[in-house]
Image (cartoon, rainbow, N blue to C red):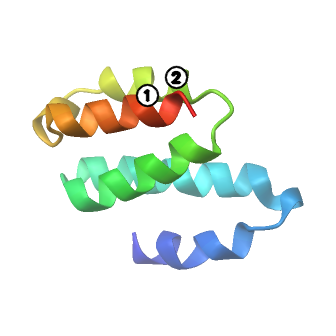
Amino acid sequence: MRDLEAALPLFEVAEDQHMRKYVLRRLVDASIRLRDPTRARRWITAALLESTTAELLLEGLRQRPGVDAIFTSADWARFEALTRR
């Protein structure tokens, strides 16, 4: 996970957006798998803010097994608000 976190800032330029999206998805996946709500909130927030299909991304996250156990209703409300930006 730390390697991915260190790599993410390297993909700031426009031509690396596909790789940045891939790294963000891996960070979201890893933080959920590790049941680390702090990291998961951070990376989900970043992914939602950068996504052109934030609603679909959030819906996919909600359908993942076990994800409800690490987030509160306030977290989900915050994520929902980010999709409306």
Q: Residue placed at 11% from the left, 36% from the top?
A: 69
Residue 58, above or below 47: above
- Residue 58 got which mark? 1
Give the CA distance from mark 1 to mark 2.
5 Å
Q: Is residue 19 left or right of residue 84?
A: right
Residue 8, above or below 50: below
Name which residue type carries label 1.
Leu
Name which residue type carries label 2.
Glu
Q: Quadrant of residue 2?
A: bottom left
Mark 2 lies on residue: 55
Q: Quadrant of residue 30?
A: bottom left
| Residue 51 visible (yes or no) | yes
Q: Residue placed at 69% from the left, 32% from the top?
A: 52
Q: Is residue 13 left or right of residue 77?
A: right
Quarter holding the N terminus? bottom left
Q: Is residue 62 left or right of residue 84?
A: left
Q: Residue furthest right?
A: 15
Do labels 1 and 2 touch, CB within 8 Å?
A: yes
In percent of width and height, residue 45 lies at 44, 49
Q: Residue placed at 28% from the left, 47% from the top?
A: 32
Q: Quadrant of residue 51?
A: top right
